[in-house]
Amino acid sequence: MHRTGELYGHFETLEQQKESAALGMWIFLVTEVLFFGGLFLTYTINRHAFSAAFGAGSNTLDLTLGGFNTVVLIMSSLTMAMAVWSAQVGKKQLVSIFLIATVVLGTIFLGVKVIEYKQKFDHHLIPGAGFDIRYHAEHPTAADNAGKIAEEKEELEKAFAKDPDLNAHAQLYFSLYFGMTGLHALHMIVGAGLLVWLIKGSFAGRYTPKYNTPVEIVGLYWHFVDIVWIYLFPLLYLIDRHH
Amino acid sequence: MSEHIVSPKIYVAIFLTLMAGTAITVWAAYQNFGAFNIVIALGIATFKATLVVLYFMHARYSPRRTQLVIVCSVFWLAIMLALTLADYQTREHTVGRLAPPVIFNLVRT
Amino acid sequence: MSKTPPPSPGPNMPHEDYLNATYGLKSWLLTTDHKRIALLYLGSVTVFFFIGGIFATLIRIHLLTPTGYLVTPETYNKLFTMHGVAMIFFFLIPSIPAVLGNFLIPLMIGAKDLAFPKINLLSWYIYLIGGSFVLYSFSTGGLDTGWTFYTPLSSVYSNSAVTPAVIGIFINGFSSILTGLNFIVTIHTMRAPGMTWFRLPLFVWSHYATSLVMVLGTPVVAITLLLAGLERMFHLGFFNPALGGDPILFQHLFWFYSHPAVYIMVLPAMGVVSEVIPTFARKPIFGYSFIAGSSIAIAVIGFLVWAHHMFVTGESTYAALTFSFLSYVVAIPSAVKVFNWTSTLYKGSISWDTPMVYALGFIGLFLIGGLTGLFLACLGLDIHIHDTYFVVAHFHYIMVGGAVMGYVGGLHFWWPKITGRLYPESLARTAAITLFVGFNLTFFPQFILGYMGMPRRYHTYPPEFQVLNVLSTAGASILALGYLLPMLYLMWSMRYGKVAGPNPWPATGLEWTTPSPPPTENFDVTPEVTWEPYDYKNRPDLGLTAGAPSPAPAHGDD
């Protein structure tokens, strides 16, 4: 397959090439919608069946970190959109700046995710033999607020009264929590890799008003990953917060 | 595809709306709306997702074909969710002789 | 405006084609030419066909006697599982799309290649990686869950190598997704000037519909098998009732893909038949837009029927009623196709060439397979024949009688285009008839067995079922001969067959206007399409003028 400048030989025009690439990415995103859709369906059925356990599991998540990450990710979508705009209007330097900002924000998101996972690990909330949803309430550390721990204990007892099998069913919640956020994080890592590749191209000044297809289609992917999080955040972090 | 350049002003406006949406979601989660908590949360999330698709992903300015692709993805997701949930929502409370007890729990709640 | 394509080069004109443009292993393994990738797929799906075929042979030999002396019950479970996995995921699903579709779609729409040639090659490598995992599973303990991987058997209790198999099928799914994605984009953006949507060959329409199913369904089975695999590896509980999970949810998710997957197998075969019938009836296809539309309708409605596989699982009666009704609805577009093909044959100038024998065989077998499918969609009747040999016979009529007949028929039809040479016609016709007879003898007795109550997936059966089982095994031997023959003479013809020329049948599609085998770039100049599809009446260039006796197709042994 020969190539003339930015045009691959099997296309007639740059326009046709760009259309094909964009359509290809959109169709790929359709497959992603259905891929995550299967997970969301599993989540829905289980949450409906075990609402007490899902509420208890959700309340163990750190809303501050989750909310912070939501802000970070939406901000990274903004910088990504700005990178596309910079390429479209021919501001070559801005393209690099915005792409770097996007990858930095993405990395911050992943870093926070690591902190959250570590916390779950410390609190014995990894599904498996060692899983114990009461662990944190019964083994508070010096850093924990005594009042909050007492409140947490009370909530857990209420939940256990509703569902004696809470420990088993909360594992389902955490399986889904790790499954969904883990797959989301995997998509972020792939996206970050693509961004690094774009940054390399932008340093070479490759993206111009005439040819910016790679920036645009990676942008589509990045925004999609943002959309998945827009749904994950309320579904995982915000169940039964009003107690 | 005739290229439509969205101005940064619109991007920033969308960003601010998304931030506001996030704040409202968190606020709403702490109110007791009963069964409507989840409806409100998903409603806001869908509103935010729509904004991202229309403006950040330029779907509003894209060719019909792209818009059709988006509609298809939502439609097929809806098929999967709706027809599966239709089964769960209409099960008899006694499922079957051979079903293990835990299935009864699943259906009753 | 000329109504005909430019004259084709003569039959023996020397030219550089895609086969001799470059040489060496590297030029094949790193090729981005859709025609070479199609041949890579041809080789690899054939390997899986024979692996699956060996398992099938062992199953039929074992079932010769009621007690079955050949293998232990545990091994028998593995045999039918591995037969299903190899045949469905690694032969039937990629067979027509990845071999014939890959080769023909760009040629049929007048493009130089698919929209994403590198992704096309990537999808073949993904197929190989997925296939290796599955072969690893087969050779290190085998697989005994049934090809459906129902939980909690697959995720908890099975002692076989489920994890690598699940990973392999998960990986292979992406090969299918990328092929479908590539086809959809290609059909949208790569059509030659004048190739409007309603001038597309019906083969392209059916592949468009197939690609929709691949793109919309495969991700769901990917996530489902991923969850089942995670459940097995980390003892999670998504689908395990002992841990609060729901096995019926697994079945919903699994069949959301796996029912439409049947249409991934049969829709492309319908596309082949829609090309072959007008060619050998020398008539424009009857009801072009209805056949095109019914392909799309099958793809869409096919997504609304999945829970008819679950009538006896304890799903809601109301849901079962709905799915039963919707399953009847999907018969309508299928019937539209059959009626249109038979109407095309009516008063046609029919010649009994090998591809035509396969196409007519397809119509008959698909009819039986489709109608028995309606028996199974009937809620009350399904309770009686569920999980019996009736089901086995039904889906083999669709998958082997339908999809494989279409695939082998299509291979014969386009073999002169792929290799530039003709196969020996009378031998090929004999093989086609052998296949048809062998197939019916194998599977028709299974309808009766199933109706009499012989359950599927059992290693043993009561003695009164022996006669029908022996008949079935005898048929399978004839069937095997029917598959081996084309293997041999097609390979022989690659070297010794008569030179075919660009359009031996002759047929009307764009792919027949370029030399056989085609050059790497497919067309020397981008063609401009000014004629309607299947227009045998207005194509003097084919030598098929009205009133005059039509020329006989070129044959390998005339």
Image (tube, helix red, strand yellow):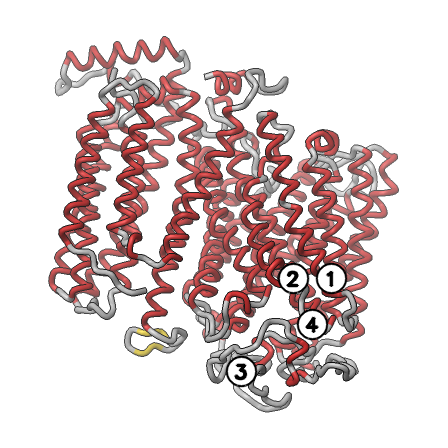
Q: CA distance from mark 3 to mark 2?
A: 36 Å
Going from N to C along the chain, the mark reached first, 4 or 1, is 4
CA neighbours of label 3 inside 10 A, class few (<14), some (14 to 19), many (20+) = some
Q: Secondary structure at mark 2?
A: loop
Amino acid at pointer 2: Gly
Q: Respond whether the residues carrying marks 1 and 3 are from the same subunit.
A: yes
- C275 relative to B80, above or below: below
- C313 relative to C56, above or below: above
Checking the image for residue A109, the label placed there is none
Q: Residue A132 at what x, y percent from top left?
A: 33, 19
Q: Which residue is the site of mark 4?
A: C279
Q: Which residue is the site of mark 2?
A: C287
Of A120 and A101, nearer the camera is A101
Residue B45 in view (yes/no): yes
**Chain holding disc 2:** C
Q: Is residue C247 left or right of residue A87?
A: right
Tell me whether circle 3 and circle 2 mark residues in contact (CB < 8 Å): no
Mark 4, mark 2: which one is toward the viewer? 2
Amino acid at pointer 1: Ser
Q: Secondary structure at mark 3?
A: loop
Amino acid at pointer 3: Asp
Going from N to C along the chain, the mark reached first, 3 or 4, is 3
